[in-house]
Image: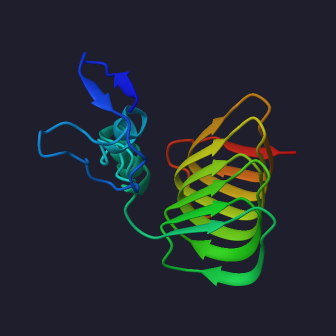
Amino acid sequence: MLRSETLFGKRETNTPNPPLSTTNNLSPTGTSSAPKAMSSTISNPVSNSMTPTPAQNTQLNSSTNEVGSKLIVGPNIKLKGVEITDCDTLVVEGFVEATMDSRVIQIAERGAFKGSAEIDIAEIRGEFDGDLTVRQKLVIYATGKVSGKIRYGKVVIEEGGQLAGDVQVGTTATAANPRGLAVAKAV
């Protein structure tokens, strides 16, 4: 019989490899009968399981903490001629031609939206063409292009972002301008 030295100075005999299992193979004396190379990989079945770590749980929870309904139109998807209702967040990575009233719209860098939208918050990295009413905040990133009839509460435009068309501060086109709010015509 061959003998091998273990990490803890104990000697044990090498035996043929036992069948793999997820439990420790202990002899009546309390020592492992499995070769050390195998016992180190199967001695802690929890570490090799699909259970997420606390750090992974935090990441999963942060991405799923969004409240409400979310519609994602993926890359290379074309959605035409629809009315989108009861959608809290619309993420456009493909092409959407629609009418919608929602809370948030996020247009990805390669995404495009054509139509009419009434939104609380709009984040544009791609293209928007049509009637856009943003009740709270319109954010146009460096790669974003917004054109058409645009109404907004607040606007943030990154350097390189484009805004063109009939652009007005305020969410209604016919609202009186009692405070002398700026009205802009962009080209």
Q: Is residue 102 left or right of residue 133?
A: left
Q: In the displayed orientation, state which residue is furthest to the front.
A: 1
Q: Residue at x 78, y 40 (%)?
A: 143
Q: Residue at x 28, y 30 (%)?
A: 12
From the viewer's side, name the closer residue of 1 and 76.
1
| Residue 175 can be seen, yes or no | no
Q: In the displayed orientation, state which residue is furthest to the top.
A: 9
Q: Is residue 22 above or below residue 118?
A: above
Q: Is residue 138 left or right of residue 140?
A: left
- Where residue 75 appears, x then y in whole percent? 76, 61
- Where residue 103 appears, x then y in whole percent? 49, 63
Protein image colouring: rainbow
Q: Report the number of numbered marks.
A: 0
User: Which quarter shows the C terminus?
Assistant: top right
User: Which quarter shows the N terminus?
Assistant: top left
- Where residue 41 appears, x then y in whole percent? 39, 40
Q: Is residue 63 left or right of residue 128?
A: left
Q: Residue at x 67, y 50 (%)?
A: 168
Q: Residue at x 34, y 47 (%)?
A: 57
Splitting the image into 4 quarters, where does residue 73 fall?
A: bottom right
From the viewer's side, name the closer residue of 73 and 4.
4
Q: Is residue 130 above or below residue 168?
A: below
From the viewer's side, name the closer residue of 90 and 76.
76
- Where residue 4 appears, x then y in whole percent? 37, 24
Q: Is residue 79 above or below residue 41?
A: below
Q: In the displayed orientation, state which residue is furthest to the right.
A: 187
| Residue 11 can be seen, yes or no | yes
